[in-house]
Structure formats: structure tokens, C-alpha cells
Image (cartoon, grey):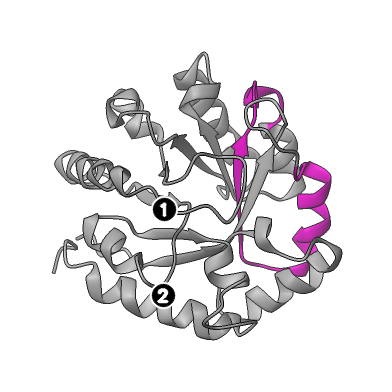
Amino acid sequence: MNRPAPLLAPSLLSADFARLGEEVRALDQAGADWLHVDVMDGRFVPNLTFGPLVVEALRPHTSRVLDCHLMIEEPERYVADFARAGADTLTVHVEACRHLHRNLQQIQGLKHHAGGRVLAGVSLNPHTPIAAIAHVLELCDLVLIMSVNPGFGGQKFIPQVRPKIRELRAMIRERNLPTRIEVDGGVIVDNIAELAGDGADTFVSGSGILRSERFGRDYAAAISAMRSQAEAAMTWRDP
């Protein structure tokens, strides 16, 4: 029986960097399921953000899942460092991995050194087809579908990615896998129901939660509203 609950993952890319520890604690108390950490190297994407030292510094501030999205070249060089720093998920990009199967095996292997904690994820840019991960899906605890071009927060959702969500959900159901589908980019309270209806169950939202005009700094209200919308729309789940 497959009835995943919707998970809300506020993106720290939209947080106040001068108050990052406070922001993490506030999101934890507001009911965030995961905290999404956008790791950018200035090579794979045109921006620089967090590294393992920041993850290590944030770890004492929350018991929530630190969902580390590695938008970096040669991720195999750094995944162990992020795991040691306290990352709970490690998601690498199809487009950045020359040996994707080996990279995912490496992350799966880190579970033995982290008490089974680390989840292995793979991410696809908007233009990358689902077929690119068909032969590694069994190694993925989650698949992250980018609904904006990676590198910057606050971008508008690209609606053309929605068929990819539906295609991936069908593939996961056909293979009877527990793999989660995460969507990142332009996710707000006004479109989360559509994405949940398509088959997504994990939702990254930066400005939709931390910089929302509707909810202001009431993170709990934003998270609660988005969770309710997603829960009602996930009609594809087994009864």
C-alpha cells in the first residue's frame, strides 16, 4: 500500500542569511518536514551558496531532514563530506554526473556509515527527459524534478514540466517503488495542488513560504495551507 504523506521542504535559499540559524529554528517550529539546502558551485550553476561547513553549523539547530540538493560538478568528490556534516538526503544532477549509476551507489553506500539515514536522490533539469533515469530508478530514494532552471531563487514555475511528473509517477507505480517525487522551483500555494495531482509528494518552496506576500512571515500558515492543498489533491495514492 502506497500512501505517502505530502512533505513540505522550505528552501533556505530564500532565508535571511544573516539569521540562518534563527530561520531554521523558525521553520522547524512552523512544521516544515524537510529543510532544503541548495548547494551551488558557480560552475554547474551560475551562483555560489552553501557548503558542508554550513550544513554542519545548521545541524544542531534542527532535527528535521536536511535535504541537500547538490547543484555541483563532480559531486562524487563531496557527498561524503556532506554526509559527515549532517545531510539527510544527497541529490545529484543527471547533467553533472559522468557515471550516474556509480554516483548513486556511492550515496547508497554512505547509509552504512550514517545509521541508515542518508537518502539518495537524482535531479533533472527542465529539459532533461525522465528516460535519462530509467535505468537507475531503483537506486533512487527520491527524484527531484526541477521546475525552473537551477541557479537562482524566486523564479516562475515552468508548466511544461508537469507531464514529466505524471510520467515518472506512472513509472514508479509500474515498478512498485517507494521513490518520492520532489518538485523544486516556483512552487506556491496556488499551484501545489496541480503538482500533487500530477503525482508529486515532496515540495520545495522558497519564496512561496519564506517571502510570501500572502502569508508574510507566518511560516506556519504558509506550510499548513500548502500541505492541505497537496493532501487533498493526491488522489493517485492507493486507498
Q: Above or below — where is 224 with respect to 142? A: below
> Can you tell which mark lies on residue 36?
none
Specify start and end residues of the magenta stretch as a single range: 49-78
Residue drawn at point x = 34 percent, y = 59 percent: 201
Q: Earlier in the sequence, mark 1 or mark 2?
A: 1
Circle nearer the viewer, 1 or 2: 1
Q: Nearer the viewer, residue 23 or 88?
A: 23
Q: Quadrant of residue 52?
A: top right
Q: Amino acid at mark 2?
A: Met
Disc 1 crowd, CA 10 A, few/some/many (<14, 14-19, 20+): some
Q: Amino acid at mark 1?
A: Phe
- SS for dot 1: loop
* Marks 1 and 2 in Cβ contact (< 8 Å): no
Mark 1 lies on residue: 157
**In magenta stretch: residue 159:** no
> Can you tell which mark lies on residue 226?
2
Disc 2 crowd, CA 10 A, few/some/many (<14, 14-19, 20+): many
Q: Nearer the viewer, residue 87 or 219?
A: 219
Q: Nearer the viewer, residue 186 or 199?
A: 186
Q: Quadrant of residue 135?
A: top left
- Cα separation between marks 1 and 2: 16 Å
Instruction: Tell me if I can see residue 33 in this picture.
Output: no
x, y percent for residue 69: 59, 43
- SS for dot 2: helix
Q: Above or below — where is 215 with respect to 182? A: below
Q: Quadrant of residue 50?
A: top right
Instruction: Tell me if I can see residue 198 in this picture.
Output: yes
Instruction: Tell me if 11 is positioned left or right of 180 in this view.
Output: right
Residue drawn at point x = 37 percent, y = 28 percent: 128
**In magenta stretch: residue 68:** yes
Quarter of the image for the C terminus: give it: bottom left
